[in-house]
Amino acid sequence: MMRRPWAGLRVFDSTTQRSEGCRIIADMTPLENLRLGAFTRRDNDIASDLDRVLNYFPRLKARTGLAGYLSGGEQQMLAIGRALMARPTLILMDEPSMGLSPMLVDEVFSIIRRINHELGVSILLVEQNANAALSVASYGYIMDRGKIVLDGTTDALRDNEDVKEFYLGGIGRQRKNFRSLKSYKRRKRWL
């Protein structure tokens, strides 16, 4: 029997949990949703992990009603918390900021950064909000029309003139008209 190279890797793919929003189980409480995340585990250390997740997401402690009544940010926190209950080594996140208020985006990305640093969980993040993504990433790839056109460390990407111009709101005080500029110059520079 051939051993798969990923056999020992525990992965949570948030894309299987979301379809234009978090796929939480709306008819269950947040606590029941979190326990469901540990369903595949064989150890008895679920209570300590549940406490850890609730420390990352204290808003979920106070929510005793059905998960379907949580706000969008709370549902996103619940989906991430449920992923952590499986003790993954890698979490794939697709647009964790989608539909969230700017304040909640900052809070969710701050928690993502803490999870990465404190638990050592690798996170593959797909995000259109370039500022938020670069605030938590250590390495990034920029795709244009399905092709990787630029990659590098976050510092290198932040300092890149094209990234500043096209994704981070312009170069300093020089704001340009994106309708005439964006597709022409980017196509010439990157292709």
Image: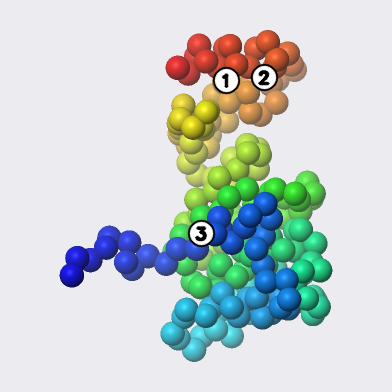
Q: Residue at x 57, y 21 (%)?
A: 162
Callout 1 amino acid:
Glu
Circle 2 SS class: loop
Whether residue 60 is visible here, answered yes or no, is no
As drawn, 42 above or below 162? below
Residue 124 visible (yes or no): yes
Q: Quick one: label 2 or label 1, which is nearer the N terminus?
A: 1
Picture residue at 81% right of the left edge, 68% below the top: 69
Q: Are marks 2 and 1 in contact (CB under 8 Å)?
A: yes
Amino acid type assigned to the residue bearing label 2 in the image: Ile
User: At which x and y percent is residue 65?
Assistant: 81, 78
Which residue in the structure is indicated by mark 3? 13
Q: Is residue 50 shown left or right of residue 57?
A: left
From what the image shows, is residue 191 above or below residue 139? Answer: above
The amino acid on which the numbered mark 3 sits, given as a three-letter code, is Asp
Q: Quadrant of the N terminus?
A: bottom left
Verify CB contact (< 8 Å) between mark 3 and mark 2: no
Q: Which of marks 2 and 3 precedes in the sequence? A: 3
Q: Position of residue 28 (x, y in %)?
A: 71, 78
Q: Which residue matches tag 2?
A: 171
Residue on which the image places disc 1:
161
Kindly report which numbered mark, 3 or 1, lies closer to the viewer in this rendering.
Answer: 3
Q: Residue at x 49, y 71 (%)?
A: 87
Q: Is residue 142 above or below residue 182?
A: below
The quadrant in which residue 58 appears is: bottom right
- Compared across the picture, whether 186 is left or right of 96 comes to left
